[in-house]
Amino acid sequence: MIFLSPLARSSATDTETTDAAKLVEEAKGREALLQRLGKKAEQVKNVLIGAFPEKGPPSYALSPKAAVTLLFYDRLKVLENAAYGDGQLSDPHIEAFMQKVREHFMPRTSSKKAKA
């Protein structure tokens, strides 16, 4: 689970900011973000939580209008991308998305084994 936030930016992702006071404020904001995400991480199992600057990775072409985007990827290739506006994501959407994930990772049975 990746949260996009302007607080996730750093001098590593924004090399144009050189003002020391701005860099200190940036670090404080990032630390506060990481503490909030740490609390969320304590509430879930088997989920990695992280943050990225608000535009997201350029190669993902994320919609800036989406409140939630579900990405399913395998071996660094995005296989499914579903974007939802504020309040649009529901349990049936999540279940349909997770079904695609389960189908992708289910062991494939060879035709010989299926006939046996």
Image (cartoon, rainbow, N blue to C red):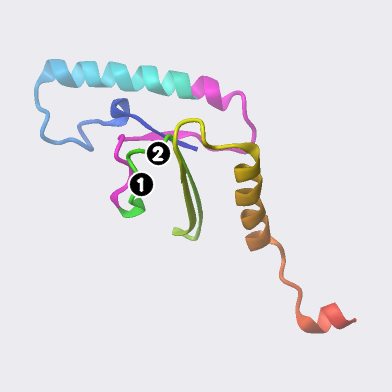
Q: Quadrant of the C terminus?
A: bottom right
Q: In the displayed structure, does residue 104 sit left or right of residue 64?
A: right
Residue 111 point in image, percent of width and height? 78, 82
Residue at position x 32%, y 23% in the image? 30
Label 1 sits on residue? 62
> Considering only vertical position in the picture, is 4 above or below 29?
below
Q: Which mark is residue 72?
A: none
| Residue 10 in which image quadrant | top left
Label 2 sits on residue? 66
How packed mark 2 is, by other alpha carbons closer than 10 Å (few <14, some 14-19, many 20 or more), is few
Foreground disc of the pair 2, 1: 2
**Labels 2 and 1 touching (C-beta < 8 A):** yes
Q: CA distance from mark 2 to mark 1?
A: 8 Å
> Considering only vertical position in the picture, is 106 above or below 58?
below
The stretch of residues the image draws in magenta is: 38-58
Q: Nearer the viewer, residue 51 or 18?
A: 51
Residue 40 lies in the magenta stretch = yes
